[in-house]
Image: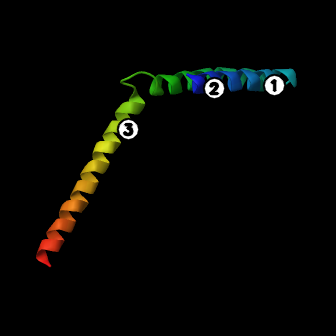
């Protein structure tokens, strides 16, 4: 939960900093785009069955197949030698 809190804090401070320096158009654009991006990112990473977890599991299975294939190839080459 701490990374989420830090994300919100940094976002708020950056927004406030832009507004305080008179860059209200930039601040508004930052907030408008940033809220969508943060929401999408948090949706991607949160939950026990998050898209991040699903992606990780798919990649892990792929690497498991890769290394199993290398091990089988090594075994086959050693038995031929």
> Could you tell whether 73 is left or right of 53 in the image?
left
Residue marked by disc 3: 56
The part of the image, by quadrant, that contains residue 30 is top right
Label 1 vs label 2, nearer the camera: 2
The residue located at (21%, 67%) in the rendering is 74
The part of the image, by quadrant, that contains residue 25 is top right
For the view shown, which residue lies furthest in the right direction?
Answer: 21
Task: Choose between 48 and 24: the one closer to the eye.
Answer: 48
Q: CA distance from mark 1 to mark 3?
A: 36 Å
Mark carried by residue 17: 1
The residue located at (87%, 25%) in the rendering is 21
Mark carried by residue 7: 2
The part of the image, by quadrant, that contains residue 12 is top right
Q: Quadrant of the N terminus?
A: top right
The residue located at (51%, 24%) in the rendering is 42
For the view shown, which residue lies furthest in the bottom direction?
Answer: 81
Q: CA distance from mark 1 to mark 2?
A: 15 Å
> Could you tell whether 45 is left or right of 21 in the image?
left
x then y, percent, for residue 46: 46, 23
Q: Residues within 10 Å of mark 3 (few under 14, many from 20)?
A: few
Task: Choose between 28 and 41: the one closer to the eye.
Answer: 41
Secondary structure under tag 3 reads helix
Secondary structure under tag 1 reads helix
């Amino acid at each position: 939960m701490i990374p989420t809190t830090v994300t919100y804090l940094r976002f708020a401070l950056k927004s406030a900093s832009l507004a305080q320096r008179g860059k209200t158009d930039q601040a508004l654009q930052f907030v408008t785009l940033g809220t969508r991006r943060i929401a999408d990112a948090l949706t991607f990473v949160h939950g026990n069955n998050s898209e991040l977890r699903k992606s990780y599991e798919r990649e892990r299975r792929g690497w498991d197949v890769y290394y199993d294939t290398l091990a089988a190839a090594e075994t086959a080459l050693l038995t031929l030698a």
